[in-house]
Amino acid sequence: MKNIWFNPRFANTAPETAIFADRDGTLIRHIDYIGSPEQVELLPGVKESVHKLITRGIPFYILTNQSGVGRGYFPIEQVHACQRRLFELLEIKPEDISGWCIAPEAPGTEGGYRKPSPRFIEEALQQLGSQSIATHMIGDTLVDLETAWATNSTAWAVGCGKPQLPAACHAGEIGESYEFRDNFPACIRAIID
């Protein structure tokens, strides 16, 4: 499995909408430095929502920071094993989605794909063949929102991951524009239904 992958089937399709989602705390239950496939647990409704995106042909990307690798906690192969387990639980093949980005860099590392870097979303839009696609970035941390803002994507905060982001949202501490929903399925309903 590669760290960065774009599905060639979506090249130059210039869709109207593309969805980018954080993994841990958004699609699966948040565990700090998750390194074992046995720890991967889908959050409620995620499988159905991902299948809805696939059925409708809406490009869907998974974008995850995995600094446990850069910090030396576990090798990249363990992250790939967790990613494979995610696809098993979603009951899809990796080729069913538009792509993914696993950013293994430790915080402060220059030049990688680690969020809030806009690099992966920018490259995805290039591959899709249009910069004017309505992009949405869904996640459970401020860095996910910062990634959205850096790419002029709609920022979606979910309340099902780390507690800091919902607390900041409810306290009115986030100055820039974002949407808040309880979970990933609620975001997908709001975007496409």
Image: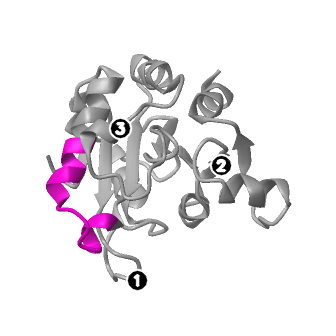
The image position of residue 69, as x and y in percent, is 25, 66
Q: Kindly identify the amino acid type of the residue bearing the numbered disc 2.
A: Ala
174 magenta-colored: no
Seen at 59% across and 65% down, the residue is 146
Q: Kindly identify the amino acid type of the residue bearing the numbered disc 3.
A: Val
Report the front residue among 75 and 103: 75
| Quadrant in the picture for residue 109 | bottom left
Seen at 53% across and 62% down, the residue is 147
The image position of residue 27, as x and y in percent, is 47, 37
Label 3, on which residue? Answer: 40
> What is the secondary structure assignment of the residue under circle 3?
loop
The image position of residue 125, as x and y in percent, is 40, 51
Q: Are marks 3 and 2 in contact (CB under 8 Å)?
A: no
Q: In this rendering, would 169 be left or right of 153?
A: right
Label 2, on which residue? Answer: 157
> What is the secondary structure assignment of the residue under circle 2?
strand
The label on residue 108 is 1
For residue 122, above or below residue 111: above
Q: How is the image coloured?
A: one colour
* Numbered disc in front, either 1 or 3: 3
Q: Kindly identify the amino acid type of the residue bearing the numbered disc 1.
A: Gly
Instruction: Specify the segment rendered in magenta.
Output: 68-82
Circle 1 crowding by C-alpha within 10 Å: few under 14, some 14–19, many from 20: few
For residue 152, above or below residue 60: below
